[in-house]
Structure formats: C-alpha cells, structure tokens
Image (cartoon, helix red, strand yellow):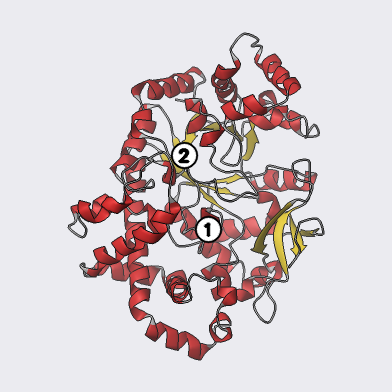
Amino acid sequence: MKRESGVLLPVFSLPGPYGIGRFSRRARRWIDFLAAAGQSYWQILPLGPTGYGDSPYQSFSTFAGNPYLIDLEALIERGLLTAQDCESLTPRDDSRIDYQALYEKNAPLLRKAFASAAPDGDYSRFCESARHWLDDYALFMSLKDKFGGRPWTEWPEEIRLRRPGALARYREELAEEIAFQKRVQHEFFRQWGALRDYARGRGVRIIGDIPIYVAMDSADAWANPELFELDAENRPTAVAGCPPDGFSAVGQLWGNPLYRWEYHKETDYQWWAERLRAAFELYDVLRIDHFRGFDEYYAIPAGAETAVGGAWRKGPGLGFFRAMERRLGKREVIAEDLGYVTDSVRQLVADTGFPGMKVLQFAFDSRDTGSAADYLPHNYPVNSVAYTGTHDNETTAGWLKNILPEELRKVREYLCDFYTPDAELAKPFVSLAMSSPARLCVIPLQDYMGLGNSYRINRPSSVGENWLRRVREEELSETLCAEIAAVSARYGRA
C-alpha cells in the first residue's frame, strides 16, 4: 500500500478575519499549502453546530453543519452583506476564538444576509434531499431560541414529548425562524461542498470525524427518542462515559444517551445508515470516535455524579459493520481504538479490516505499561494510522516538557538522541512517527510548528479553555511548508 501523510487541523483553527476559521479563501490557501507540502490528507474535527462548552463532539445535530464556519466574505462578494456589517466580528486576538462574540453576532449577520436573498432551485432540492433530518433540526433550533436556549429536556411537556398538536402549532408559529435555519444549513453545505471539491482537485483528501454518541441536547435525541435509552418522559435511564483508570480515579462522565441497540438491529440500522451515508457525502475517509463502544460500551446510571458506578455492556459488534457494508458498500474508515483495549476490541478492528490508531506519546507513558509496547513504532502494523498525538493530547512540545524524567530518558533512548536540546526534541519525535511502518501518518500542525500546550486543542474532562486556538496566516510560511515536504519525502510519504 502507498505510504502517505496528512496534517490534523480543525476548520475552526484556520486563519481569517471574522473570529473563527471558515470556509474561506484562507481555507483554500491552506489546502494549497498541504498540496505544496506533499500531503495527501487533511484531518478535521466534527463540523456540527456546537452547544455548551463549544465542543464539536457535543453537537445539536449529527447531520447539521456549524453556522460559525460559513464564509462571510463569500456573502459580502454576493452583495448580501458589507464589510462594514462584519467589522464587529474582527477579533482583538486572531490566535484565539471568542465564542461569546460569535454567539451574539454571527446569527444576526446571517439573518440580514438571507433576508435580502430569495431562495433558489438549489435550496429547494437541498430541503428535499435533507428532509429526513432538516425539518426536525430547524424546528429544534427554533424552539431552543424561543425557550431561551434551554435544553429540550426542560421544555414544556407537550413539545418535549412531541405531541402532534404542539408540533403543528409551533411549526406554524415559528415558520419564519424555521425557514431561516434551513437557509443557514443550505449555505453551509453549499460552501463546504465547494471547499471539499477544491481539496479533491488539489489531490488532498479529507478525513472527517464523528463521535459514536450524539449529545443529549440534540435534535437527534429529541426527534428520535425511540433510538435511545430514554424513559416514558424522554429522560435518560443511563448515560455514556469511561470507567476509572490510570488517568482518572473517577472515570469520565460524558452524559450522552445510550443507544437501544436491539431496536437499531430490528430496523436494520436504518438511522445509522442515514448517518454514515451523510458523513461520507462530506468526507473521503471517516474516523469513528470511541470505536470500542461497538464491541462493549460503558453504561452509567442516570443521575450519577461520577463514572465509578457504571458497568460494561455488549455492543452490536461485527454484525453492525456487515450491515453497513451491505447498505453503503465498502467505505474508508479509521477506527479510534485508543484507551483500554481488550482482545475482543482488537478482534473487532481486525475483522472489519479498518486501520486503527497508534499514538506515539502513549508508548512512553509509565502509567500504562500494559499496552505501551503497542505504541512503539517498530510494532505498528502497516494497516494503521500513526500520530504523534491527537486533538485530545498535549502538543508534543508541551508533553516533552511535562513528562517524568524517566519517561524522557526512554524517549531519548528510543530515538538514540542524547544531544538535541529538550526544546527542539519535538522535531525528531515527528520524524519517528513518520518513519513507522504505518501506511498513513497524520501529524497535528502544532507539532510541526513546535508549539507548547498553550496551543493545545482540547483537555478532556474540562470546559472553558478548549477548541480556542487558531493559526495565523503568516505562520503558514514557505519554510514550514518546505520542512513538512522534506520529512514526508524522507520517509516515502510525499
């Protein structure tokens, strides 16, 4: 198989003038940068609309797109907005995202843009093709606005439980807002489709990402309660998370609703087929987060304050992926098989034929000696994807600064490098990942740049300082491009 490489950078981290990375000409320049650097892939994070905490892994919809990513410059060029209209979103610090400003100012700009533009035939076709999720999503977001942003579990009972009379009444009352929400989604998918096509034209394929679970406060859970472990009042009976381990004594309490897997099986996984089909219309390759949940998943009683009291349950297993292949054909998937991996999880990954993930930082973690050897590069199978770290890890420079002295010694011994200054050790660490047998190697841009933990994307189990960092346009220099191209060529990946 051909050796290839790519770069991990969220769309929101792209440069640009209006507070967040968008589907703009800077995104196209970024794709040009990747092509010039000999990269075959751009890996991104989920593109859904974000809620509390701004996490792309807790979205209001697994199907919808994030309005923050819509390119305002394109709307200016079409005469729907002016540059003066958008000035209020010009950030004081273009290396960080101000989500409060986006929350307050982005939607009014989109409302102004679409108020002066009549829908076209493409809009009608989009609404028809997306009807299976769009109608419920547009109503859901309109209701959230009406009820002051409260979660749907706190709405009045008649609409929380989707009683037909209430649905009809609110659809009539909120018709204008519903139409606006649909216009926003049409613009999102039109712009993303153009950017995706541009990437394909430059030889850059996009690796997308979906979390295994949906958010509790989502159109998915509200509109399809039968798919999830909810009671008669549509409240969860158990929620998702991870058990206590060496990284957390109380585990992780995610709070996502769990699937009624027997119901999904009875429907031949219809909802999942629609979900994955929609994802593959957006991306060339799909990374599925928390892959082990298809083998076994951790269920925590609803209302628990920590994940300590949860229990493992059996997931749908290989039958799910056989059904997806029968319905969708063979597709390219990356299995996020990180964390505590059992023999049955390893077998499921092997049976699907999907490449798993190998994170180089994990090879030197003294807290996890049981599986550390699996992450040493000489043990990587060809059918795997190598990373220095992911969006959930420290940057490599930050990690090298914080690890224990004995862990740093192991890194240097493995590298056979006792002379490179600690502050510059991230570069040989990147080379180590690139030299592995793994067919594909994906490096976070921060690691190529040697940036510290102030540029970290996410700190799991924390809120407030995540999903914030952006790259400045001047940082995407010709020198950086040449360095990425050189290391990719050196290890046969360019």
**Residue found at x 63% / y 29%:** 399
Q: How many marks?
A: 2
Task: Residue at the far front: name it.
Answer: 92
Q: Residues within 10 Å of mark 1 (few under 14, many from 20)?
A: some
The percent coordinates of residue 448 (x first, y second) are 49, 26
Question: For the residue labelled by badge 2, is the local secondary structure a helix, a strand or a loop?
Answer: loop
Q: CA distance from mark 1 to mark 2?
A: 22 Å
Q: Quick check: 330 above or below 129?
A: above
**Residue found at x 56% / y 19%:** 423
Question: For the residue labelled by badge 1, is the local secondary structure a helix, a strand or a loop?
Answer: helix
Quick one: quadrant of the N terminus?
Answer: top right
Q: Nearer the viewer, mark 1 or mark 2?
A: 2
* 171 and 123: which is toward the camera: 171
First in residue order: circle 1 vs circle 2: 2
* 260 and 240: which is toward the camera: 240
Task: Residue at the far top: name it.
Answer: 419
The kind of residue on which mark 2 rests is: Leu
Q: Is residue 84 left or right of residue 63?
A: left
Q: Quick check: 153 above or below 480?
A: below
Residue beneath disc 1: 276
Q: Is residue 290 visible?
A: yes
* 140 and 359: which is toward the camera: 140
Residue beneath disc 2: 9
Q: Is residue 308 left or right of residue 453?
A: right
